[in-house]
Amino acid sequence: MPSSPTPLRSSSSISTSSSWPSASTQTSIHEQTPPIIRVAIVGGGLGGLTLAQILHCAPNVQVTVYERSIDEIERLSGYRVMLSSFVLKKLQATLHKDVWDRVAASIGVQPQCGQELTFFKSDGRKMLAFEADEIRDTYSVNRWLLRNALLYGSHDFAIFGKTFQAYENLPNGGMMVHFNDGSRVECDLLVGADGIGSRVRKQLVPDARITEPWLAIIYFKIPLTPVTENLLLTQSMTRAFCHRNQNIFIHSWTNPRKHWATLYDEYDIGMDESFIMFGYGSPCDEFSNKSKPPGELSSEELKVECLERVRADPKMHPSFIALAEQLIINTAHIHIVRDCKAIKRWNSGSVTLIGDSVFSISTVLGKGANCAMLDAIDLAEALQLPQIFNPSIRSHELQQAGARNVKRRLKERQRGALIQNIIYSGNNKMKELCRDLGLKLAFEWIDDPRATNFHSGKKRCPEKVERS
């Protein structure tokens, strides 16, 4: 493991009066060193690392990421995320070329005319397809490779094994950030990028409550081979409604340098191998295994859970059963869906939030990573303005960036929540009928109002994203 970078300002016994001056106080005409803004980012996920990579290349910004995982490998997990061509082009324009080249390698092979989301009954009957431009214009990105790319050179700006505890405002306008190990650092701006359970948000917005989980989604990888590819009902995103208010979600990531997976067995698969993501969602009370809470089930138990479900549905299409039999055990992950109260603003010129630390977004439309990246890019642009060293201007710009962040996330939260609530509303025949009718109307509502009929068959091939 590479050596840790020098933190912004760290000590277990430093007094406030002897701390480094904040950016707002570095105004002496005799000062030889140009002023800097010291940015501390709590959380080394996609949003936090994107912000750090952009700011690391910026003059007059000193950035450090504090990640609670012991090392960078611990959080190198996940399946695939969906990123729009707009976000990818913004990343290409703002990231260092060495980083972008690695990000580009995480982008999977795109279907000829873009992505689509097709709904089926469990027996394979097609219900409807959402083919709006916003779906076609997104790319399947390998989450593991993406985060690994964003970790490139991180020994210069990331410290692992640091768990945020609290922050305090200093008289000089700076912030003191405290960690569980008793250490602390001083900064000018604290960024909470620590996810839905954000400790930074908990202190900044104490009334932002997290709801009790009611929904759980089991995820596995399946190796993409000629055999498993032939089992797919579409070449893009597939969601199939099953009995007892359950559904299967399937999507693939294809390595452009190696179409078929070869390095795998029943327990593991190489992180850069092409794969099919297999998700099985249901209310928590629909789990067959009730011996323990869903989040405590082992990988083997989660695979058994999926197999029992597909085999228990008398109408289940043989392809779904065959795919479930190919689940790779050690790739199991269970996502317990929790919801955080939407917050509309926070009043601080020294603390801000990005990503799910603001509030969560349903995963059904694949907008979470997209929003997190845009949050990071937008904030990075604000922090690189020439006048950002003026405290009042910095406070204003942070408030504006936060407002844009919330507006963007509220829109996607409302759209995603609508679709999610409809998807998980069919626990009897009458509700299933209402669900099927409501789903079509809901997609027409969230789609561009000018494209009133997305079943017209008109297909627009989106603009390609250059990989290098």
Image (cartoon, grey):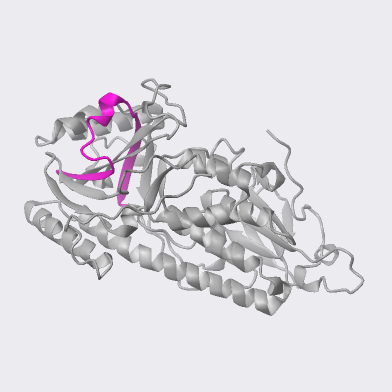
Above or below — where is 421 with respect to 286? below
Above or below — where is 21 with respect to 303? below
Does the segment drawn in magenta span residue 228?
yes
Would residue 338 be visible to someone looking at this image? yes
Above or below — where is 431 with respect to 294? below
Q: Nearer the viewer, residue 339 or 126?
A: 126
Residue 74 falls in which quadrant of the image?
top right
Above or below — where is 398 with respect to 458? below
Residue 247 falls in which quadrant of the image?
top left
Does the segment drawn in magenta span residue 68?
no
Left or right: residue 31 versus residue 127 is right
Residue most toward the bottom? 392
Q: Position of residue 256 (x, y in %)?
A: 43, 35
Residue most toward the right? 30
Residue pictured at 82% horizontal, 63% vertical: 20
Residue pictured at 46% horizontal, 31% vertical: 272
Give the magenta range: 214-243
Q: Position of residue 260 (x, y in %)?
A: 37, 27
Q: Position of residue 19 (x, y in %)?
A: 82, 62
Residue pictured at 21% horizontal, 58% vertical: 422
Left or right: residue 137 versus residue 122 is right
Would residue 43 be visible to someone looking at this image? no
Q: Nearer the viewer, residue 329 or 102?
A: 102
Q: Position of residue 215 (x, y in %)?
A: 30, 50
Residue 71 falls in which quadrant of the image?
top right
Instruction: Count every numbered label the image shows and give the total.
Output: 0
Quadrant of the frame with the N terminus: top right
Q: Nearer the viewer, residue 453 or 179?
A: 453
